[in-house]
Amino acid sequence: MKEELKKITKELQDQLEKVADISALNNFEKKYLGKKGELMLLLKKIGNLPETERKEIGQLANEIKTEIKRKLIETKEKLGGNIGAADKFFDATLPGTKIESGHLHPLTLVQRDLEKIFSSMGFMILDGPELESDYYNFEALNIPKSHPARDMQDTFYIEHKNKQGEYDMVMRTHTSNVQVRAMEKYGAPLRGVALGKIYRNEATDQRHEHTFYQIEGLMVDKDISIAHLMAVLREMFKRLFDQSANIRLRPGFFSFVEPGVEVEMSCLLCEGKGCPVCKRTGWVEMLGAGLVHPNVLRAGGIDPKKYSGFAFGTGIERLAMMKYGIDDIRLFNSGDLSFLSQFDS
Ligand code: PHE
């Protein structure tokens, strides 16, 4: 049987080489590989062999069949014949090609985390315009005309003047523009966060961008104190970074809060031991916050005698840098796939 198989293989190969056109090839196929073809008849006999031989011969026969079919298709292709997809040699053992698909940007990931964290604490998600009036960005926030934050250095003013000839529209310099808008719309009590893009006329370096994202938090109710602020921030850090962080406050000045604080968090990268990210102090400055200034509550139509509130604001890039250990803010907008693909989940 083995000999017979070898003989017919040789014959098949010789014949196939002689095939010169498609019709000869079709005849060849019928003669040897058709249902009653010579090779097929021979293969049928394998079933009658004693079991000991059947396995070995069967394997050999299959190999021969596959090889002849492959050569046949090759010849067909060479002769210009049409080969259907089903005829093409397909090796099911080859690894598949990976289908490239998009994924979320790291800032979107952090943004979604934050929205989830704050929604679960009963905060609504607020929105506000990026092209903002001088009123909501500054005036309503108790930022007087002479305040350095209004300096042309920091603010992108739009070429639009009011009747008094003053520039009255800006690209918002912080998400705090949402504070008074939210108070006007919802009144007190109020809990909300606003996440979005902001603009600063600043030179770009490792830590600064002219366009970046902030999250603003605002809570107004009866007897709100710094303790409420600390509790909410602790919860935010714990859930965002998956570990508890220590928080400490330093006095800080923002016109729209009184008292104002700078919130520092124990450095998660070195666990407070001191590293380049925390400038060897063990603490990193994370956000600006404080109790909402009575003038701001009043601007929002809320009586400061009845209600108090806290507000905080920080850069989402800064949170993402801490969470993922990123040391250059410019990477976020670099479009660098070797950076971005690390966030493919
Ligand atoms: N708006 C401030 C900033 O952009 C942050 C801040 C928000 C401070 C709310 C206090 C209260 O730096």
Image (cartoon, grey):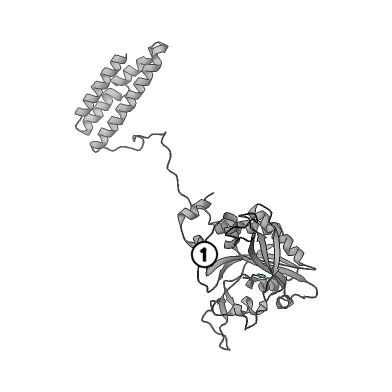
Towards the viewer: 209 or 51:
209
Q: Is residue 37 above or below residue 106?
A: above
- Quadrant position of ligand 1: bottom right
Towards the viewer: 317 or 84:
317
Residue 96: x, y in percent? 43, 40
Q: Image check: 190 left or right of 31?
A: right
Q: Report the residue at 42% width, 12% height from top.
A: 51
Q: Image check: 222 left or right of 184?
A: right
Q: Report the residue at 36% width, 23% height from top.
A: 62
Residue 294 visible (yes or no):
yes
**Amino acid at dot 1:** Gln
Which image quadrant is residue 164 in? Answer: bottom right
Which image quadrant is residue 170 in? Answer: bottom right
Dot 1 beta carbon under 8 Å from ligand 1: no
Which image quadrant is residue 40 in? Answer: top left
Residue 80: x, y in percent? 24, 38
Mark 1 closeness class: few <14, some 14–19, many ≥20 residues within 10 Å: few
Q: Identify the residue under disc 1.
A: 206
